[in-house]
Image (cartoon, helix red, strand yellow):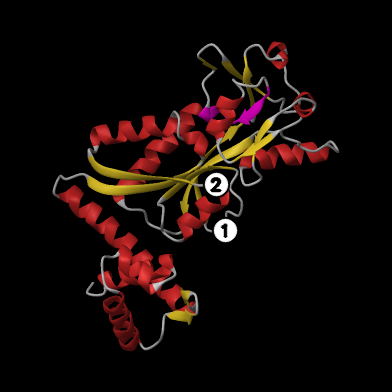
Amino acid sequence: MRHLQTFRLIEAVARAGSMRKAAEDMNLTASALNRRINGFEDEFGTELFERLPSGVRLNPAGELLLHHYRAMASDLERVQGQVADLSGERRGHISIACSQALLPYFLPRQIAEYRKDHPGVTFSVNIRDRAQAEQELASYSSDLALVFEPVYLVDFEVIHTIPQTVNVVMRSDHPLATKPEIRLRDCLNIPHVAPTHRFGVRHLLDFAARRNSRQMSPVIETESFELIRHYVMHENVIGFQIPIGLRTEENGILINRPISERDLPAGSLILGQMRGRTLPVASARFAMQLAHALGELSP
């Protein structure tokens, strides 16, 4: 326990990549921070950082130690949550890495519902793509991840999963709006706005296009689904999104329709945590609430 503050300093240095920058972040002088790190390295018996001309970075020993600290901090947070429950105080902090599609409607509603019963609990909502979300779990930066089409799933323990079709987003006066079923070829033959390759929606679209000897040729590529939703109202093009991030109609102008699953099978929206980790009390309870809410959305 006596080394917790030192571990926080080590983590700050690793994050900043520089003693000077970390010292500024932690409101210390660079010399004081350097003495603290050097003293711990002497006591620990090995150096934790490689000293480089451009700054510092963790060596393998430092990476092992930092992983240990993050696991220990997580366990301590879990115990603190249990103690708070014993005293009748429902406190804690929940960090979640999520896809952008969860931001407009689903996640705000779920957080507000949780905080009605647990007003002492605070949240960090980290917008991450599918690869970054898994990294957040592995580094203990986030307790939970809720992402569309995760990449690796090596350290990812699935809590709940639901299918999500890829939907076409368009103005109500777009020619495709009158079609009873939208085929992928319809989408590829007209101007479209698409997310970049980092996102699960684009991964599914590219895969389906290649299977038909075609390719995506968007007029705009973006990392923002908000931009996609708003841009299609200015130029009569189409965009793509998953249903959980959409309303059936928006202001009577914007509509969405699923692409036929004959061309593009549904992907998976997955709620998960780091494999083998025992979550803090608040995070575990919120995970149960999310799983229940996702279950109600399933077809």
Which residue is located at x 24 percent, y 52 percent?
Answer: 81
Residue 140 found in image quarter? bottom left
Quadrant showing the N terminus: bottom left
Q: Nearer the viewer, residue 270 or 193?
A: 193
Task: Answer whether residue 111 is magenta in the image.
Answer: no
Classify mark 1: helix, strand or loop.
Answer: loop
Left or right of 36? Residue 202 is right
Which residue is located at x 76 percent, y 24 percent?
Answer: 183
Rendering coords of residue 163 (x, y %): 59, 34
Residue 175 found in image quarter? top right
Left or right of 54? Residue 112 is left
Task: Answer whether residue 240 is magenta in the image.
Answer: yes
Query: From mark 1 to mark 2, how far is it between C-alphas?
Result: 16 Å
Count of all numbered marks drawn on residues in the image: 2
Which stretch appears magenta? Answer: 237-245
Which residue is located at x 64 percent, y 42 percent?
Answer: 196
Q: Residue 154, labelled with which disc?
A: 1
Rendering coords of residue 147 (x, y %): 53, 43
Rendering coords of residue 299 (x, y %): 56, 25
**Callout 2 crowding tier (Cα within 10 Å): few <14, some 14–19, many ≥20:** many
Residue that numbered label 2 is attached to: 129
Which residue is located at x 35 percent, y 41 percent?
Answer: 286
Ranked by sequence position, the earlier of labels 1 and 2 is: 2
Q: Residue furthest left?
A: 87
Amino acid at the residue labelled 2:
Asp
Indicate whether 195 appears above or below 258: below
